[in-house]
């Protein structure tokens, strides 16, 4: 990088601070998210050969609030446990099915129940000096999240709580089926069997906590998650102004609606043909913690592109940038939507010593918590990656 590296971190942090102060929290499809997108496009216009503010529609509330629908269906099923356990099993299976479809497979099964709204992805293209032989995308997202009170209370135990809640639901379904079989064939054993009724009863408590305490109505500033990544795209754009690549066309992308996983899904669907063979390097929450290259996102049932992960790791090592390799215990990134669309992608995430993103979905996710040095390392990593790609093409 140039001798401006010493001022790069403060400049990027100033950008984050300005958006937080002038725009504030940016819930997906809100006016504030749209305003942030406009500001980012203005930045891209000074760095890119062309820019686009791309409109899409979605049902943003569905992603998280589908949990409440799942839990409602599950609780209704519990009512039938004693006299029609088959209905408990059916309703329980339907509840877990909705949860899995929406939050794991990113299907929009209950979305039409929720209001439709409009969001805007923003991207800019930087052309190479010579012909384009490869497209590479460097991306982040500009929306911010609801506060997650459960996570703030439980910390690293949060994934365990989720798994325990789902596990109790699965056990309840199995118990309901067993009770149905006993009712049908061995009713004399019901009295001995029903001591296990405590499982369905107890399962209702974490289900309700999960449904109504997963999120509050407060929206966080999202300085780290994820204006930090948007700032990285700006840092990459600045470098490319003075160091154009030979054969790699670079797209700087800022997704909307990442917190409901709809923005990048619409982007991937719209550009699927154009981006066949392109490389996406996504950044998320890289304003604090240690940089990790993700190889998979189990919650979203995706395996990220192995050769792309290897290339990012090799680029980091060649440039003396410290990175680790990991798999998140909960959550995921926009890279999953591109993978599900058949494209090539990986993500770099900043993870703290507790195994989670620093101040994840917390009201403490403010500009004061941003570490300039981590931001600069993320920019250096993106540049090393782009140079490695271009070097293979020349």
Image (tube, rainbow, N blue to C red):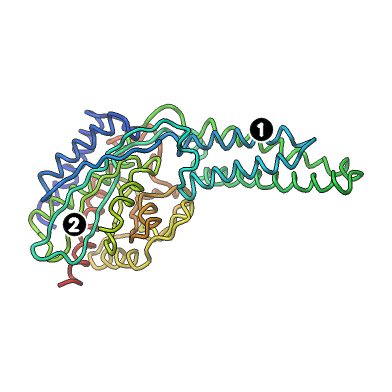
Location of residue 311 in the rendering, given as x and y in whole percent from the top left corner: 30, 67
The quadrant in which residue 250 appears is bottom left
Location of residue 140 in the rendering, given as x and y in whole percent from the top left corner: 28, 47
Q: Residue at x 23, y 32 (%)?
A: 35
**Which residue in the rendered view is the most extreme toward the right?**
188
Image position of 159 with respect to 279: above or below: above
The disc label shown at residue 250, or none: 2
Location of residue 90 in the rendering, given as x and y in whole percent from the top left corner: 67, 43
Dot 2: within a 10 Å radius of its alpha carbon, few (fewer than 14), some, or many (20 or more) residues? Answer: many
The quadrant in which residue 247 appears is bottom left
**First in sequence: mark 1 or mark 2?**
1
Q: Work out whether residue 282 or residue 182 is closer to the camera in this orientation and state it.
A: 182
- Considering the image in quadrants, where does the N terminus appear? bottom left
User: Separation of disc 1 and disc 2 at Cα?
Assistant: 51 Å
Q: Residue at x 34, y 36 (%)?
A: 144
Image position of 129 with respect to 77: above or below: below
Dot 1: within a 10 Å radius of its alpha carbon, few (fewer than 14), some, or many (20 or more) residues? Answer: some
Judge left or right: residue 225 versus residue 18: right
Q: Which residue is mark 1?
A: 76
Judge left or right: residue 284 versus residue 103: left
The quadrant in which residue 45 appears is top left
Q: Residue at x 38, y 52 (%)?
A: 337
């Amino acid at each position: 990088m140039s001798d401006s590296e010493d001022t790069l971190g403060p400049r990027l942090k100033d950008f984050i601070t300005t958006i937080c102060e002038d725009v504030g929290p940016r819930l997906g499809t809100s006016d504030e998210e749209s305003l942030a997108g406009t500001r980012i496009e203005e930045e891209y216009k000074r760095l890119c050969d062309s820019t686009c503010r791309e409109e899409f529609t979605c049902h943003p509330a569905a992603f998280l609030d589908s949990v409440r629908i799942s839990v409602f269906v599950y609780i209704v099923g519990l009512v039938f446990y004693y006299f029609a356990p088959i209905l408990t099993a059916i309703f329980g299976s339907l509840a877990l099915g909705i949860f899995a479809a929406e939050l794991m497979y990113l299907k929009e099964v209950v979305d039409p129940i929720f209001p439709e709204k409009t969001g805007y992805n923003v991207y800019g293209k930087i052309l190479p000096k010579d012909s384009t032989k490869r497209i590479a995308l460097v991306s982040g997202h500009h929306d911010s999240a609801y506060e997650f009170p459960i996570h703030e209370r439980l910390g690293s135990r949060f994934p365990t709580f989720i798994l325990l809640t789902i596990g109790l639901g699965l056990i309840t379904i199995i118990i309901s089926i067993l009770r149905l079989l006993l009712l049908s064939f061995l009713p004399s054993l019901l009295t001995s069997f029903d001591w296990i009724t405590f499982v369905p009863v107890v399962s209702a408590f974490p289900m309700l906590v999960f449904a109504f305490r997963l999120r509050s109505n407060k929206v966080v500033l999202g300085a780290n998650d994820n204006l930090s990544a948007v700032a990285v795209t700006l840092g990459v754009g600045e470098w490319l102004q003075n160091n154009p690549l030979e054969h790699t066309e670079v797209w700087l992308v800022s997704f909307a609606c990442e917190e409901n996983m709809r923005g990048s899904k619409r982007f991937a669907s719209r550009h699927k043909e154009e981006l066949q063979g392109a490389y996406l390097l996504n950044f998320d929450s890289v304003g604090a913690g240690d940089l990790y290259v993700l190889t998979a996102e189990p919650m979203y049932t995706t395996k990220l592109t192995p050769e792309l992960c290897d290339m990012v790791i090799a680029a980091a090592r060649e440039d003396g940038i410290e990175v680790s390799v990991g798999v998140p215990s909960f959550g995921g990134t926009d890279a999953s939507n591109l993978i599900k669309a058949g494209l090539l992608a990986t993500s770099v995430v900043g993870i703290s010593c507790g195994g989670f993103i620093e101040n994840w979905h917390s009201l403490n996710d403010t500009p004061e918590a941003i570490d300039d040095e981590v931001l600069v390392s993320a920019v250096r990593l993106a540049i090393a990656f782009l140079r490695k790609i271009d070097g293979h093409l020349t």
